[in-house]
Image (cartoon, rainbow, N blue to C red):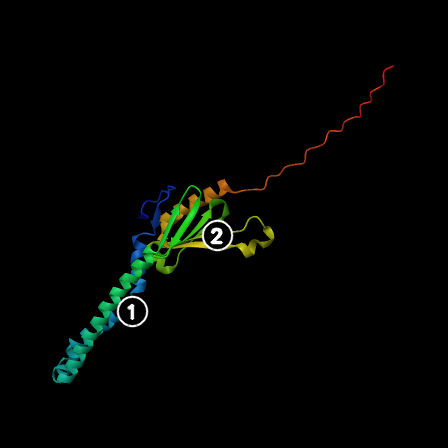
Amino acid sequence: MTTTTTTAHAVQPSEQYHKLGRKALYLLVIQKSLVAIFLLVIEIALLAISSSGVLNSAVHSNPTLIAIINGAMLVVFLFFIIAFTIGIMAGYFAYSSFRYKITENGFSIERGIASKTETSLPYHHIENVEVEQSVMYRLFGLCDLIVLTTGRDDAATKSENESKIALSGIDVAAAHALQEYLLSRANVQEISPAETAPAESVPTEPVHIEPTA
């Protein structure tokens, strides 16, 4: 199976899966590396303390304090390397485990790496497509594309059957292009019940055959 990164904004139906894009990868790595960022802040603070002019005389006059600060800096740096490596790997796996594709028949998403799960949605099951953007996503030019689906066949249970499929962290321009395409295909393929009037019966007059002599 081949996958491509979402770069072009023109939507072309194909059997090829697409990933969310590099900006989504960068954001996932940052989200998974929050512990590493915290440790980096501590490392910078320890470095500032050790080189501070105010504490310089006190630090150099106390070998034990020097050893404690240097040891703490080393430990924090090692934990930072470990946490940052884990964050990169976790972000990449989260990015690689989600894919989507647009085909002639519908919209599909695939989750997982070793064990994969695919969810397919025919166009005529699409009720609406929304684009939502958080503050964090605005900084990266990303958004959530939410595809709302509804059980159209039974109006009485419409609220119970309503569900959604979300593409989280997709590029804004690509999301708007997908939104326009999915809505247009949903309108074209929307199935409405055929309204057929019963055929009117044509009354026929009885035919009398007179017996011949």
User: Does residue 78 appear to the left or right of 122 in the view shown?
Assistant: left
Is residue 159 among the parts visible in the rendering?
yes
Is residue 139 among the parts visible in the rendering?
no
Q: Is residue 94 above or below residue 192?
A: below
Q: Residues within 10 Å of mark 2 (few under 14, many from 20)?
A: some
Q: Residue at x 48, y 49 (%)?
A: 128
Secondary structure at badge 1 equals helix
x and y, in percent, of residue 129 in the image: 46, 50
Q: Mark 2–mark 1 contact, CB under 8 Å? A: no
Q: Residue at x 22, y 68 (%)?
A: 81
x and y, in percent, of residue 162 in the image: 52, 54
Residue 181 falls in image quadrant: top left
Mark carried by residue 35: 1
x and y, in percent, of residue 209 in the image: 82, 20
Secondary structure at badge 2 equals strand
Which residue was labeled with disc 2? 148
Q: Residue at x 30, y 67 (%)?
A: 34
x and y, in percent, of residue 115 in the image: 37, 57
Q: Is residue 109 above or below residue 13?
A: below
Mark 2: amino acid: Leu
Q: Residue at x 24, y 64 (%)?
A: 85
